[in-house]
Amino acid sequence: MDIILKYFPGLTEEQQEQFSKLGALYEEWNAKINVISRKDIESLYERHVLHSLGIAKIMEFKAGTHVLDVGTGGGFPGIPLAILFPETQFYLVDVIAKKIKVVNEVARALGVNNVKAEQRRAGTFNDRFDFIVSRAVTNMPDFVKWIRKNIAKKSNHELQNGILYLKGGDLTDELAAFPKAIQYELTDYFEEDFFETKKVVYLPLKYKL
């Protein structure tokens, strides 16, 4: 929990309480349904919670914003972002039903009311969102194909509506077809070694009928 306060010192008491409960909740659920690797559960706050909040260093979602989290797994990055931005609506989807069960149970236990989670496959629905977030579920060309039709028309932020994607390593080839993509190095925001190769990729996308 200290690592979250280190980089987000302005949390309300309610947010601090919600973040502090995450560790025990995920330990409990991970023992029943494996949504986080055994070795990572001990580093939950650094490798999952803070990593998810890397998006918040790039984008401060306004009240009323709608965000889609594709391939959320156990709720990352959606759950930490929903705690940080309680007036933003988050829709978390994953193809694996047991992972969505964990997401819903964690959100309920925390009293996070701005999260809706369902078992759905990307590309199978037409709902529109201001931003689409994810943690490296696939390569960017395939990801864009999945979610292209889910971008809302009107932009309300300084950054145009689009994708905020957590990924690591050399993305030169993967992003070659997307000259407008911007890579934000998470080492500019977090000093832990884990973030050495981690990035937030922002890709603006236009509304498509």
Image: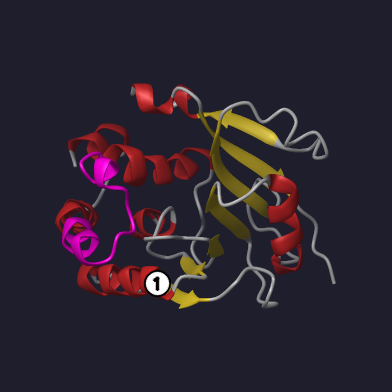
Q: Position of residue 202 (x, y in %)?
A: 64, 42
What's the amino acid at mark 1?
Answer: Ile
Residue 129, image x, y percentages: 63, 67
Q: Nearer the viewer, residue 70 or 173?
A: 173
Question: Exactly how many numbered labels are in the figure?
Answer: 1
In this orientation, which residue lies closer to the viewer: 100 or 162? 100
Expressed as whole percent of the image width and height from the top left, the position of residue 77 reads 43, 53
Write the residue at 52% across / 68% down.
Answer: 64
On the image, the x and y values in percent for residue 120 come to 55, 75
Q: Secondary structure at mark 1?
A: helix
- The residue drawn where x is 59% and y is 47% is 164
Q: Is residue 44 visible?
A: no
Colour setup of the view:
secondary structure
Which region of the structure is painted magenta?
25-44
Residue at image position (63%, 26%) is: 170
Q: For the N terminus, which image quadrant?
A: top left
- Reading the image, the residue beneath label 1 is 100
Mark 1: give few (<14), some (14-19) or many (20+) Cα within 10 Å: many
Q: Is residue 191 above or below residue 96?
A: above
Q: Main secondary structure of the magenta part?
A: helix
Q: Is residue 173 magenta?
A: no
Who is closer to the viewer here, 167 or 31?
31
The vertical placement of 151 against 54, above or below, is below
Q: Is residue 206 visible?
A: yes
